[in-house]
Structures are given as C-alpha cells and as structure tokens.
Amino acid sequence: MSECGVDLQCITGILRSAIHELPNARDKVAKVVNSLPENLLNDIINNEINPEDLKRLCEVEPPLIKAFALVKPYRVTNKEVAQCMALALLDAGKYDEAAALVERAMELAPNADDLDYLRALLSIIHAGSLIPKAENLHINNNHGEEEELITRAARDYINAANIYEAINEHEHAELARFNALDLLAKHYFIHGNLDDALKQYTRCMAVIKDEEITKICKSMMMLIDAVMSGSPEKHVVAGDELMNNNMPQYALLAYGSAYQLNDDPYIYTKYIAALINYIDDKIRDEYGSFMNLLNDIRITGIKSVADHMGVSYDALLKYLEAKAALEYGREPSALIRYLANDEEMISIVKKKLSEWLSQENNET
C-alpha cells in the first residue's frame, strides 16, 4: 500500500487484484480495506469497484463492516449481495445502512419467494434502531419518550414474529418474540417495576419452547426474585445461573448486590470472576484482543477507554488488576491472594500493570 501513496487508481488496482483472488486472499482484502481512510474507501467502493467485485466482498469473514457501511444501495445489483451485507450490518448495529440494503433487496426482487422474510427482517432492524435511541433518552432522564420507543420496538419484534410464524420460520419467530418480551422486561427492571418485569419473563416461560431461551428467562426470573426477597443467598444462586447462561452483566449485578448484603470474600471472588467475563466479552467486541486494549489504554488512558467501553473507571481498573494477578499465577489462588490483600501479590500486580501500560505491545 505504501508504494501507492494517495494514488487512487493504484490503491484500487491492489484492492481489485486481491478481490479477484478470493476466497484465498481474504486476509489481504481485509488488510487493504481496514487500512484505508473512510473518504478514500468510500470513493473506491462507490466509484471504482464494479458490482461483481462487491459481490465477492461477501466472501470475506469476518464481514467487512467498514466497507459495507459505505456502499450506496443503488450500487448493489444482486438481491443476495444486498441481503448478505444487510445481515452483517445488522449484527454490527448499523441499522440505517442495513435497512437501506434490505429495501434494495426487495426492489431488486419484488416477487421473490422470501419477500415476507425480508419484511420481517426490516421490522427487526427497525426495532434494533430504536433501542440505542431509548438508551440515550434514559441517560438524559427522558423516561416518557424512552418507554414510548421501547414499546414501539417491542411491537416491531412481535410484528416480525408474526410474519416468521406465517412462513413457518418458527425458530426466527421464537427469537423475535423473546426479543420483545426481554426488551420490555429489562425496561421494567431498570426502572424498578419488578412485578411487570417478572410478568414478561413468566410469559416467556409459557410461550417460548426453545430450551436455551427459556433458561435465560428462568435465570432472569431468579434475579428478580432475589431482588424482591433481599436474600444474599438467592442473589448468589441467581448469579451462578446467569453465569451458566453466559450473562455476566447480570451476574455482576447479582453478586454485587449479594456482597453488599453479606461481605463474604467468597462472594466477592464470584463478583470479580463475573467482571472478568463481562469485560472480556466487551474487549472481544470492541478491540479484538487484550493487547489491543492495552495499546489503547497506553495512548488514551484508562478513563477514556472505560468511557468508550461503557464501563466505569473502577470496574476497568479492577479488571486489569485481576488479569494481572491471573497472568502471574494462571490459577485462581493468585487472584484470591490478591483479593485478600496479600502484600506480595499486590506488589506483583502493580509491577505487571506498570509493564503492560508503559510500553506499546504490538501482539494481537
């Protein structure tokens, strides 16, 4: 790439050559796309790359979200390509771009057999687009409009579920129905309306057949019951169930509340384990690797990275300290020694953190 400088034709040639080598050149294509500034990539995607080349981009895994988000819908001439890009953008939370490409797919094949599937997908995308808007309203204490958007999003999920059911896409229907119930339940839960939150998860247990989904509903019911009872033991049991169902964010809440009610070090150890799982997941989504996270912290600081990830400074610092302890011991005993304020382990953790944050680490 360096040999091209800012020569658009040269860069386009390298990218097109790599695209033509797909699927063998997936890494090469991804490297070129991810290295380009957005304005330059936009010019290439919408003015230089032909529709057949766009089609080949769908062969790259993981999907080239950066490129897909820039594609102007009229540039896509194949329904399957529009659908492929739309699904990838939906998974990445790029709702407006995903909706535009679903609409393009419907334009390209207005009589397609799966037109109802696309209509359901459009409802799912619309629901997803309302949720971050509702979250912003919540942050700004505009709870009336927040509830209105949550209710609209739930209706969109139910609409999608009904369409899926009509075309015998039963698994998709169950997931959409669960999304509606879960969205409403969590809205009620964070606003302290525990009775209505419990009702939604009770409905989930009654109408959803998928075993994995009902496990999620059951674990959330256990958390709500624990909060209503004020029992530290019930909080711990709910936390364990939530961890078993890969829900560390809510396990954190359960263990944290349990520890406030009963400051047993054993409960605090569970809290830290949930914190590690929760932030590990966020790092995987945001940075790809722990070392990439460290590089960003080294450049911008822990507070800036914590804000970017949507966690508190204290939570991220505790996470880093726990990881440093585990890096030393590679076993729970090292972490337990640190949490027990063992002076030797505290010194080791501080030294490890200093090593991590004082120099750039290029490992990925």
Image (cartoon, helix red, strand yellow):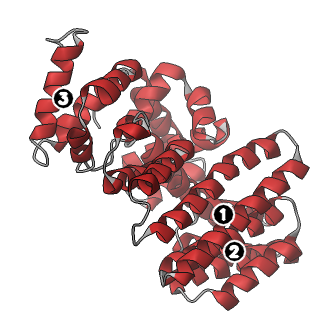
Question: How many angstroms separate mark 1 from mark 3 (CA)?
Answer: 44 Å
Can residue 149 be seen?
A: yes
Amino acid type at image mark 1: Tyr
Residue 76: percent from the left, percent from the top? Answer: 34, 43
| Quadrant for the N terminus in the image | top left
Amino acid type at image mark 2: Met
Q: Secondary structure at mark 1?
A: helix
> Which corner quadrant of the image does residue 184 belong to?
bottom right
Residue 361: percent from the left, percent from the top? Answer: 32, 28
Confirm or deny contact between disc 3 and disc 2 (CB under 8 A): no
Amino acid type at image mark 3: Leu
User: Which residue corresponds to mark 3?
Assistant: 15
Q: In terms of depth relative to the viewer, which is nearer, 239 or 10? A: 10
Residue 46: percent from the left, percent from the top? Answer: 34, 28
Name the residue: 55% across, 67% down: 120
Name the residue: 39% across, 41% down: 65
Question: How many angstroms separate mark 1 from mark 2 (CA)?
Answer: 8 Å
| Quadrant for the C terminus in the image | top left
> Which corner quadrant of the image does residue 319 belong to?
top right
User: Which residue corresponds to mark 1?
Assistant: 250
User: Which residue corresponds to mark 2?
Assistant: 220
* 1 or 2: tag closer to the N-terminus: 2
Front tag of 3 and 2: 3
Q: Secondary structure at mark 3?
A: helix
